[in-house]
Image (cartoon, helix red, strand yellow):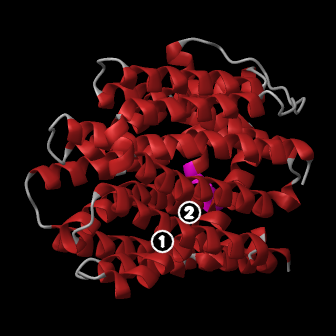
Amino acid sequence: MPRGFLLLIAAQFTSALADNALLIVAIALLQQQGLPGWWAPLLKFSFTLSYVLLAPVVGPLADALPKARLMAWMNALKMLGLGGMLLPVHPVAAYAVVGLGAAGYAPAKYGLVTELVPPHQLVAANGWIEVSIVCAALLGTVLGGGLVSPTMLSLGLEVSLGLLLGLYGLAAVLQWGVPDSGARYPKAVWHPLALSADFWRANLRLWRDAAGGLSLSVTTLFWGVGGVLQFAVLRWATERVGLGLDRAAYLQAVVALGVVAGASLAGRFVPLHRAMRVLPAGVALGGLIAAVAPLTTLGPALPLLVLTGAVGGILVVPMNALLQHRGHQLLTAGRSIAVQGFNENLSVLTMLGVYAGLHALALPLVPLMMGFGGLIAAFMLVLMARRRALRRQARLGACGSGAGQR
């Protein structure tokens, strides 16, 4: 891999590490303020909202500026949001500012991958990216758990927030070392209506593409599931097993460890032209979520949580690589990532909103998780049937073309 790509991995890992740890600290802030449990998923909701609302803008912005420089600026915005938590700003509002920085960061990061790495290395590059993201989630939740441990709470959450501020500073230093790829794109018309129309056309073009639309469906589902699972695991650990927030956060790391293993396997053994073969892993993912829900002890739950993460990693890495490849062919790098981010984060918003609402209505966790897992499995079966139909149509079209030539 190019040296610039490795620096990109290091920079985004450090920034994502701080993002994940900050979420746990923000949940502790909510608890410290005596707010009910359904506020916790609203943290993630506020973080993700910018991804959806600014989707028409962040793609052209990533294409208009040197992407590594834009990443550094967006990281500074994250630091501003964290600083809000040190002031009398509501944690949900402060975390929304962090999300604003992350929304501008994502298209630049993924777009830079497609500019620095040739197509035949995209699956491997995505394996690196996803492993680094999930390692950041794994270590970030562990770090977050440590930052809200009784020892750290006795010092005050201000100390924990100060440590995370330093971590964002390190990420900014690394980002300034990532080189400019030299890729340049036609200038966009910076008018709200023009940007919205351009984004809508790009969105439709990617959805209507056979491979692009199917892979976008899978990644959209996966990240929506991941957003809910993050809080469902925390709730499961506290309600069903009786763990505190610091130890419950470590179970998120267990799931992330599985994703690292699955993403590594997919990056190594699944080439781009065989990406669709991992679709059955989505059915298994839904079944595993349903299987974990009724358990009350860690013994049988831990291997199932690791397996759940591994299956998710095997599913998302090839689908993400295929989606990026088709998006880069059909659109520009920044626009394709913005479309992808819009759909995936709209899924996160929708699923988190539903989850928070059901939590506020006091729906028991076990039927919620089992129903959630069943819906995921059913949706993946529908996508598999759609893929078979598309392949059948392609074969019939090829036969008809051959008959016409004869």
Q: Secondary structure at mark 1?
A: helix
Quadrant into which the N terminus falls: bottom right
Circle 2 packing at 10 Å, graded few (<14), some (14-19), many (20+), is many
Along the viewing direction, whichever of 214 and 245 lies nearer the viewer = 245
For this view, does 249 lie left or right of residue 71?
left
Which residue is disc 2 drawn over? 214
For this view, does 313 lie left or right of residue 233?
right
Question: Is residue 210 magenta-colored?
Answer: yes
**Residue 221 vertical position relative to residue 94 in the rendered view, above or below:** below
Per the model, the C-alpha gap separating discs 2 and 1 is 7 Å
Which residues fall within the magenta stretch? Answer: 207-214
Measuring from the top left, give residue 255's x and y in whole percent.
47, 69
Q: Residue 110: name its quadrant.
A: top right
**Residue 87 vertical position relative to residue 345 in the rendered view, above or below:** above
Quadrant into which the C terminus falls: bottom right
Measuring from the top left, give residue 293's x and y in whole percent.
26, 77
Q: Which residue is depicted at the point 36% across and 88% down? A: 300
Question: Is residue 40 magenta-colored?
Answer: no
The answer to whether residue 260 is seen in the rendering is: yes
Under mark 2, the amino acid is Leu
**Residue 360 vertical position relative to residue 176 in the rendered view, above or below:** below
Task: Tell me the tag on residue 383.
Answer: 1
Please tell me which of labels 2 and 1 falls first in the chain: 2
In contact (CB < 8 Å): disc 2 and disc 1 = yes
Q: Which residue is depicted at the point 52% across and 70% down? A: 312
Q: Which residue is depicted at the point 37% across and 25% down? A: 85
Q: Residue 376: name its quadrant.
A: bottom left
For this view, does 192 lie left or right of residue 119?
left
Q: Residue 201: name its quadrant.
A: top right
